[in-house]
Image (cartoon, rainbow, N blue to C red):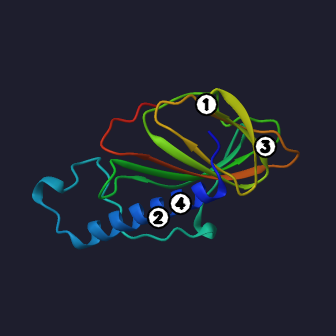
Amino acid sequence: MTITRRDAMVGFAALAGTITAASTASAQAPRAESQKPVENQKAILGPAVFHWDDLKPEKSPVGAHASICDQPTATVDRLEMHVGMLNPGEMSHPPHKHVNEELIILKEGTCETLSNGQWVRVEAGSVVFNASNSLHGFRNVGQWPAIYHVINWSPNKVVNG
């Protein structure tokens, strides 16, 4: 299955609408007693802006990683977002699968993604959707570091991995 630029834009619009609706619902709905966070449970994410200059990258053996957020929203149990920097010739981690779904948006570089059993080349501006429980991987096949954004969510399910 080939995802066209139009498909990607429709997906972005749907994701943006979902996040906006979740943030609005969180901000407007009073929290019932049963919704109060218990100890060690993260608060529901409301409207938020994450500035690029505020990200704090941490070096890794394959590049770097900067966390944006990892918490529930009004509609999903877990929304995790981060930015990765992958050195040339490196793989973010071995191919794996998990119940949560994710988008990878390649900002800079040339990579390959394992999608539907095949390695597919992706260039800057490409968007990758990893479906629930699909085997996937991501590797930098270019000459320069690759920078990519990950948006990862798990609606009402336990996240494995």
- Among the two numbered marks 1 and 4 on one chain, the one whose residue lies closer to the N terminus: 4
Checking the image for residue 10, the label placed there is 4
Dot 2 amino acid type: Ala
Q: Which residue is mark 2?
A: 16
Looking at the image, is 88 positioned above or below residue 161?
below
Q: Secondary structure beneath disc 1?
A: loop
Residue toward you, 54 or 151: 151
Q: Which residue is pictured at 39% across the width and 61% down the height?
A: 18
**Residue underneath mark 3:** 87
How would you rate the neighbour count of disc 1 (Cα within 10 Å): few for under 14, some for 14-19, many for 20 or more? few
Q: Going by the picture, which residue comes out furthest to the left?
A: 33
Whether pointer 1 and pointer 4 mark residues with C-beta atoms closer than 8 Å, the reply is: no
Of mark 2 and mark 3, the one earlier in the sequence is 2
Picture coordinates of residue 51, whole percent (x, y)? 57, 70
Type of residue at label 4? Val
Distance Cα–Cα, label 2 vs label 3: 29 Å
Which numbered disc flags the more N-terminal residue, 2 or 1?
2
Circle 3 — which element?
A: loop
Q: Position of residue 146 (x, y in %)?
A: 76, 49
- Above/below status of 29 relative to 132: below
Using the numbered discs, state the Cα–Cα distance from disc 1 to disc 4 in whole angstroms: 21 Å
Q: Position of residue 42 (x, y in %)?
A: 32, 53
Q: CA distance from mark 4 to mark 3?
A: 31 Å
User: For numbered disc 4, what is the local secondary structure?
Assistant: helix
The residue at which mark 1 appears reads as 116
Q: Looking at the picture, which amino acid does disc 1 mark? A: Asn
Q: How many marks?
A: 4
